[in-house]
Amino acid sequence: MNVKRFTAKTSREAMALVRRAFGDDAVVLSNKPCAEGVEVLAMAPEGMSQIERVAATAPRVAAPSRVQARPAAEAPEANASRSFAARTGQRQEPSFGYADPVAGEVDQDVQTLAMSTLSFQDYVRERVLKRRQAELDGKPDPIHSAAADEPAYEQPGISSIAAIRQQRAQAALQAMQPRRAEPAPVAPPAAPARRAPPVLRDEIRVPAMQRDGALMSDLGQLNDLADLPARGRRDQQDMMNELRSMKGLIEERFGALAFMEKLQRQPVQARLTQKLLEIGFSPALVRKLVEGCPAEFKGGPNEAADETSWAANVLSRNLMTDEASPALEEQGGVFALIGSTGVGKTTTTAKIAAAFATRFGAANLGLITLDAYRVGAHEQLRAYGRILGVPVHTAHDRASLEDLLELLSNKKMVLIDTAGMAQRDTRTHELLDMLAHRSVRKILVVNAAQQGETIEDVVSAWRASECHGVVLSKIDEAVKLAPALDTLIRYKLKVLGVTNGQRVPEDWHRLSSQALVQRALRAVAAGAWRMDNADVNLIFAGGPALGPQHAAAMGAF
């Protein structure tokens, strides 16, 4: 028998040393804390068979009774307590409070109980396995049932080594318990709820501070483990987003290559693409339009003569105007003209007011100005009001505006002139909230001479989708009308009228969609703005595809 001592900082490290020395079947005799951390006594599995052989051949020694010095009243207890020793032929450990035995008797007891500590681990393992099996099968606890039903008769002779080991383990358990007087009989307590089968594990006694630190570390690890599913889902979602982005980029590139290859095979579509890009239409709209263009035109009675006529018909069908409805001055109501700085809101207000006063009289017209930011801004509208014979009222906030609208509620038409603000100014949202009255319909005034990107930014910032319509101003200054029409087509905005000068009210017009498209197609790019085939390929090689917010507007193409 070779027993070795292993020391380590933790029980896990000590058990690793035991496995490294004796393998997974090593027998652990004891473990306890020490100065180095944890001390473990272990031996090889072959030592157990050797100990069992020695125990089988060891003689049984009957121990004399050691309770003769006790009073006569305690004799029955002594006779009952020695019955187990008499049956097993083993010596019992003396309890605390009795006279110390002589040295020879102590040595004899140690030899008799030498197997108790060694076989205790196997005994407990067998009991736990029996309890676990009974728990899984739904049967009562076999250990408690056997103890309750065991009759008080003499144990028969032992015939196997396993029975010897179990008997000695029971003797060790009884010897380790101190002898005490029998407690008074009490009512049996209620049966506790069944617990889960216990799991064997080594118990290591550690200081309180070290135990608390280990507990906090375990809690931190549990939190990390709890975050793993959420973290994994976020990583998976990020990866899916990247894959979708990559898929969209690949589809866009391959679509552009296929479109450019198609243009090389079909000269009609190539010419139409080059012309539309030159006059200012966006690549997104041009690509969608050209994809539906026929390969050839035969010039029939119901067919377009060439690709330009075909494109004009398609664009005019998709451009919404107010030509089929009554004129704005005939409809009546409360209208507020909004837009960026310098687009001509005050002049447009005066033109609509003059057209209305000419037909229905100045008594049915009301004018309100909100332009209190610029010095003398309201004086321009007051000058027009004096010419028309209409007083101009000023509103500084929403409350005063509502009061004025209630005051002018008997008027057929009320026009509100607002202050010009840049589309990215924070006061733009304040102005829109101020005009959020149920009776006020907003009209967005757009400068037709601006760039296409600027017009689109203005339309988005001023919430053109919530407006009654759009007025295109300064079309006489616009070299290219296509950028403005392109934005109106993609955002499905209605054109209420156009202005082409400073005269009041002569320069206020209502044009049809065909007239606006023809005016845009008549523009001619000159000088450095002209394009050839190489420039067209360069544009579509890096141009974005048609966005989802504009795809619905291309349904008629």
Image (cartoon, rainbow, N blue to C red):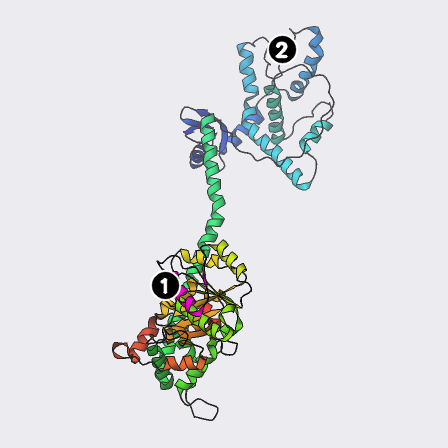
Left or right of 157? Residue 236 is left
Query: What residue is shown with label 2?
Result: 66
Residue 347 drawn above or below residue 259: above
Q: Position of residue 445 (x, y in %)?
A: 42, 68
Residue 246 drawn above or below residue 519: above
Crowding near pointer 2: few (<14 within 10 Å), some, many (20+)? some
Viewer-side residue, 75 vs 421: 421
Viewer-side residue, 327 vs 511: 327
Q: Where is residue 517 in the image (x, y as percent from the top left)?
A: 41, 80
- Disc 2 to disc 1, how far (Cα)? 115 Å
Check disc 1 and give the amino acid type: Thr
Query: What residue is shown with label 1?
Result: 341
**Is 381 colored magenta in this rendering?**
yes
Q: Helix, strand or loop at disc 2?
A: loop
- N-terminal-most mark, 2 or 1: 2
Viewer-side residue, 128 vs 168: 128
Magenta span of residues: 371-392
